[in-house]
Image (cartoon, rainbow, N blue to C red):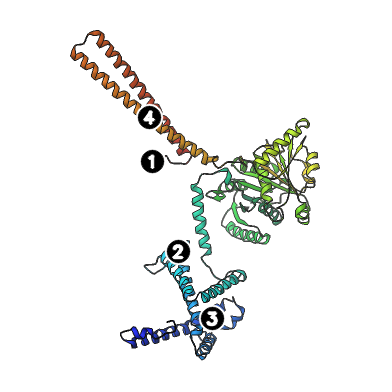
Amino acid sequence: MKSDYTAMNRVAGVAALIDAGVIAATLSSAMASFLGAPRVLQSLAGDRIFPFLLPFSKESGPKGNPRRGVIITAGIALTVIGLGNLNVIARVVSMFFLISYGLLNYATFFEARASSPSFRPRFRWFNAKASLTGFLACLGLMLAIDPTAGAVAISVLFAIYQYLKRTVSPPRWADSQRSHHLQLVREHLLAAASEPEHPRDWRPQLLALSDGPETRKELLTFAAWIEGGSGLTTAAVLLEGAGAKMLRFQSEAKSKLKGEISEIGANAFPLVLFTPDLHVGIHLLVQAAGIGPLKVNTILVKWPGHRPKGIFALKELSYRTDLRVAFRLGCNIIALHSREGAWDAIKMKPAGERRIDVWWVNDSTSRLMLLLAYLVTRNDGWEETPIHVFAMGHAREEEESAEDLRKILEEVRIDARPEIVEEVSAASVAKHSSDASMVFFPFRFSGDKIVGPLGREIGTFLEELPMVALVLASEDIELDADPEEGKAGEMAAALDALSDAEKKSRDKEKEAAQALEKLEEKLDKSRAAREAGDDGETQASIDSEVKEAQDQTDMAGRRVAKAKTKATNAAKEVEKLGGKPPKE
């Protein structure tokens, strides 16, 4: 029975040993708790997590003894003993002891799972699976002893965790969360790098280049919009100079940049580099930024007519040269222009009254702009924002052009309203998009000039629009890519071609073997006829058969060589795409 506390005495060979064991265990636990609990209380109070515990952080004597903790611990112990029934709190104490042991096991498992180099247990037979088993065993025992008390203890623990998570800032100690995240990043990057790229996986990996805080705030806010919760942004600052002094400047600039990003509330990574030459630095930065499959694919800058002094305090020609180099290195370019008061106007305008315009010319830049416009609508405050797509057309073909554009939008599954504009000019752009909240407009390089879709320089019409993102795509954005397209599809096709070529090669080898066997039969027949002394006409007929078999054998050999060459070329194509030919 549960209430029979003398059961062990009756079944034991020496009952006195049971009593002695209980007394010894009680005394050892009592002494350990009496010595350890005040220290734990003092440490907890010293962390200033719970303000009402602050008085117990005071130290006494040269060794910092927790005198106040000892007094309060003694008071709690005497109060419980005074109740005259230890079973009242036995279950609660058991629950929290099991929680302590369980969390200790889970902590070691978590540290091992995070693969942190700092986790170096001295216990020789440590095993992460054993730690996890210990945690699960403690949890099971809690629920087995008393499900209600166990659930209450777990709830209290969870409440404390939520309290700490919401109130303790900045963190007062290092935990394993960051190591855990870093390990997951490593595993996921390696996994992503091992998979072939596919158009469906494309997402904006942005490099925002700016100097001034105001410009950076605009760029990072816009970057957060076009990320759509799927990309990453790196805020980069380049310092011009060389020597050891630049290390101090770099450290100061990075600290300042972190503060600005935190103040803006942007999800961006700071990056500060110094270089003897800004042009070289920009080119190297564009090539090196990112890690593994997360390479920068889009450069975000301020439109040159409104650039601050510093990184782009260059002649406009030099600015265009840097952008052109970034474009040739495979990066999409987005140059953001906003007239005075545009940001305040967007904030003041209700979400339902905003509009995004995309100027369409049916090329890779158009598809990129349409995708970016869609990603903007995935942000808070932009969810119901309509997208208008303006495309060039001719009056007599307006209905047909609008229908073609409508079909394109349906195929790519983006809800947008197509509109045909007979002629794209500064006046027509200003006329149609002056009341839009955001405009995506294409540009391209023409010699030393930055021009629009019709080859005209981007003019002053930008001042008539609130916010314009001028976009140039260096890669083809496939909005309607099927799963079997892209490198995965190419790899599958190459492997299929290799399989077919190897099968054909084996078939030709079999045919060649059969032809050779037939030739040997004819040769044996010819030798037998000569030995038998057959007449000349019979011998000539047999020789003709031998000649025919010889020709078939030679032809089969050539077919085998041709089939093997095709199989070899197919295997090289598989390797070229990054795959490995299947083992036979």
Residue 387 rendering spot, x and y as whole percentages:
72, 46
Mark earlier in primary sequence (4, 1): 4
The correct choice, above or below, for 135 with respect to 384 in the image is: below
Q: Nearer the viewer, mark 2 or mark 3?
A: 2
Judging by the rendered image, the residue that carries numbered circle 1 is 583
Judging by the rendered image, the residue that carries numbered circle 3 is 42
Q: Residues within 10 Å of mark 1 (few under 14, many from 20)?
A: few
Residues at badges 2 and 4 in contact (C-beta under 8 Å)? no
| Residue sitting farthest toward the front | 1
The three-letter amino acid code for the residue at tag 1 is Lys
Residues at badges 2 and 1 in contact (C-beta under 8 Å)? no
Disc 2 to disc 4, how far (Cα)?
Answer: 54 Å
Residue 132 rendering spot, x and y as whole percentages:
44, 66
Q: Which of marks 2 and 4 is in front?
A: 4
Mark earlier in primary sequence (3, 4): 3
Residue 374 rendering spot, x and y as whole percentages:
67, 47
Disc 2 to disc 1, how far (Cα)?
Answer: 36 Å
Judging by the rendered image, the residue that carries numbered circle 2 is 112
Query: Which mark identifies residue 507?
Result: 4
Q: Does the rendering let one see residue 455? A: no
